[in-house]
Amino acid sequence: MSHPNTGASRGTRGKRVSTPHFLVHSPRDNVGVVVVEGLKKGADMLGVITETDKTLKLKAKADIPIGHKVALKALKKGDTVIKYGEDIGKMVADTDVGEHVHVQNLKTKRW
């Protein structure tokens, strides 16, 4: 098993495959979902866009818990957040690339 902050490689059928830190469903998404425990500020993160198998690299600008979102681009107050190719809410605070996106800066548009 790899250490969550290193993105260490693991063997898969004779190939070396890096373990991703976050996943993105659609190329349209502007947030990804952290899939490792213990992601710390300053970690170099590897991400995978599952629809295209494209990889992304970001630096974590905050500790981000597993299952929480990370900004893939700078998001401004009022921007729509796209996850799984769908509108999941709006930003209520500016957030930089690699920062934690959660209840402190994202709200549903329903309320």
Image (cartoon, rainbow, N blue to C red):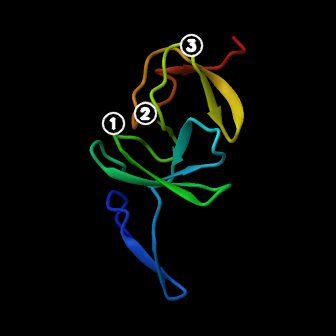
Label count reads 3
Q: From the image, which quarter does the N terminus lie in?
A: bottom left
Q: Which residue is mark 1?
A: 62
Q: Amino acid at mark 2?
A: His
Q: Residue furthest left?
A: 42
Image coordinates for residue 28, horizontal then vertical, percent: 65, 39
- In-image side of 71 versus 52 (left or right): left
How far is disc 2 from disc 3 in space, using C-alphas? 17 Å
Mark 3 or 1 closer to N-term? Answer: 1
Residue located 46% across and 15% down the image: 93
Q: Front-most of 17 and 101? A: 17
- In-image side of 3 versus 50 (left or right): left
Image coordinates for residue 107, horizontal then vertical, percent: 59, 19
- Disc ID at residue 100: 2
| Label 1 residue SS | loop
Residue located 72% across and 15% down the image: 110
Q: Is residue 28 above or below residue 37?
A: above
Of tags 2 and 3, the one toward the viewer is 3
Q: Residue furthest bottom?
A: 14
Residue located 33% across and 57% down the image: 5
Residues under numbered marks 1 and 2 in contact, where contact means CB atoms less than 8 Å apart: yes
Mark 1 or 2 closer to N-term? Answer: 1
Residue located 63% across and 44% down the image: 27
Can the viewer see residue 37 in this picture? no
- Disc ID at residue 20: none
